[in-house]
Amino acid sequence: MAPPLPGPLAHLAPLLTHYGYWAVGAVVLVEDFGVPAPGETILIAAGIYAGAGQLNIVAVAVIAFAAAVVGDNIGYLIGHTGGRAFVHRWGRYVFLTPERFRKAEEFFSRHGGKIVVVARFVEGLRQVNGIVAGTSGMPWRRFLVFNALGAALWVGLWASLSYVTGTHITAVYDEISRYQLYALVALGVLVAALVLRHLLRRRRRRA
């Protein structure tokens, strides 16, 4: 029997239970050419399942790596062949607004090739990484090398951490139950602080 998944991972349990490795590959693939899908989340959830003995961690890692590389290369092809006009016309359907795309391009141009590796770990940049590389004219072979390196590091990190968590899932749940109240209080304080900061900034702008 598959273990229950903690917190925000719980909604992925039916997907992993019914489709297993196919779910991992499909979600990671579509996330990596711009579709807003929980690729990183499903990788973590699959790693926990593997740690609990429900999936094979090597298969999870290999499938996630292949899907990440292929997905980013699809994004590169979209950016390279369609250009900015294509992205601006159709990007809004996957929440890739012109403003968001412009910021990604500026960030990309400042940091060059290494951003292809780093972007893998940054929410928002991970989804548009390949597209921006394509529109900016980065040579495909250079992109492929950096992209594969980033995918290997990203998959290796999250698959390893989540697998270890899965092997100790009972202890993890015990700790979650023990400190749940403190976590909720801390979260409440954080939300209140963010709201207060937002109100103060708005008051200063009006002043």
Image (cartoon, rainbow, N blue to C red):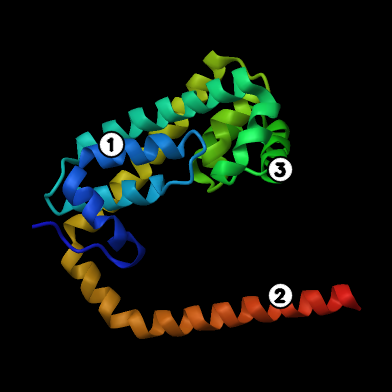
Residue 198 can be seen, yes or no? yes
| Residue 159, horizontal then vertical, whole percent | 30, 45
| Residue type for callout 2 | His
Quarter occupied by residue 200: bottom right
Quadrant of the frame with the C terminus? bottom right
Total label count? 3
Q: Residue furthest right?
A: 207
Instruction: Name above or below for residue 147 compared with residue 192.
Output: above
Q: Which is more N-terminal, label 2 or label 3?
A: 3
| Residue 109, horizontal then vertical, whole percent | 71, 31
Q: List the residue tagged with mark 3.
A: 103
Q: Do the residues labelled 1 and 3 touch (CB within 8 Å)?
A: no
- Residue at the image position 48 percent from the left and 78 percent from the top: 187
Q: List the residue tagged with mark 1.
A: 61
Quadrant of the frame with the N terminus? bottom left
Q: How far apart are marks 3 and 2 (CA)?
A: 22 Å
Foreground pick, 34 / 123: 34
Q: Which residue lies furthest to the left in this view?
A: 1
The label nearer to you, 2 versus 1, is 2
Label placed on residue 198: 2
Q: Distance between the residues labelled 2 and 1?
A: 40 Å
- Residue at the image position 63 percent from the left and 75 percent from the top: 194
Q: Distance between the residues labelled 1 and 3?
A: 31 Å
Query: Which secondary structure, mark 3?
Result: helix
Q: Residues within 10 Å of mark 2 (few under 14, many from 20)?
A: few
